[in-house]
Image (tube, rainbow, N blue to C red):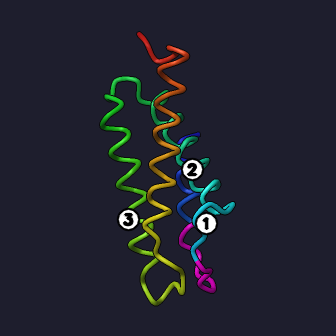
């Protein structure tokens, strides 16, 4: 499931298209947070042996790489630091949910 979600989110994020103006708290940010919430949860449960800090760092790095690639003039997309912050918020929410539920304990 992780790889399916990872691939779908990455492809959708990197499809060429007209540059949209960045929105601070629009649905775009909710979509970023939701995508990285799901990715982090799937990774955390799919690779229970990996520390959560490593999974979080990997997810955040992926979000940053997506934004850097979106900044390429070829894609005609908009690079946004606010999107990376929204990705981080989704990752943090996933960590909170994992901690509150205790579902990842051995």
Please give the residue where the numbered disc 1 appears in the rendered image. 12
- Whichever of labels 1 and 2 marks the residue nearer the N terminus, that label is 1
Looking at the rendering, which quadrant does residue 1 occupy? top right
Please give the residue where the numbered disc 2 appears in the rendered image. 33
Distance from disc 3 to disc 1, alpha carbons, whole Å, reads 14 Å
**89 relative to 29 in the view: left or right:** left
How crowded pointer 2 is (Cα within 10 Å; few <14, some 14-19, many 20+) is rated as many
Q: Which residue lies furthest to the front in this view?
A: 24
Marks 3,1: beta carbons within 8 A: no
Please give the residue where the numbered disc 3 appears in the rendered image. 65
Which stretch appears magenta?
A: 12-21
**64 relative to 25 in the view: left or right:** left
- Secondary structure beneath dot 2 equals helix
Residue 16 painted magenta: yes
- Whichever of labels 2 and 3 marks the residue nearer the N terminus, that label is 2
How crowded pointer 1 is (Cα within 10 Å; few <14, some 14-19, many 20+) is rated as few
Q: Which residue lies furthest to the top in this view?
A: 106
């Amino acid at each position: 499931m992780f790889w399916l979600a990872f691939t779908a989110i990455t492809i959708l994020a990197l499809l060429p298209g007209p540059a949209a103006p960045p929105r601070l708290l629009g649905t775009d940010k909710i979509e970023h947070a939701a995508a990285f919430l799901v990715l982090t949860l799937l990774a955390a449960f799919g690779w229970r042996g990996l520390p959560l800090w490593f999974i979080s760092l990997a997810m955040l790095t992926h979000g940053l790489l997506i934004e850097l690639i979106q900044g390429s003039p070829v894609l005609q997309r908009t690079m946004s630091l606010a999107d990376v912050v929204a990705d981080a918020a989704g990752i943090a929410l996933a960590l909170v949910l994992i901690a509150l539920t205790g579902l990842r304990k051995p």
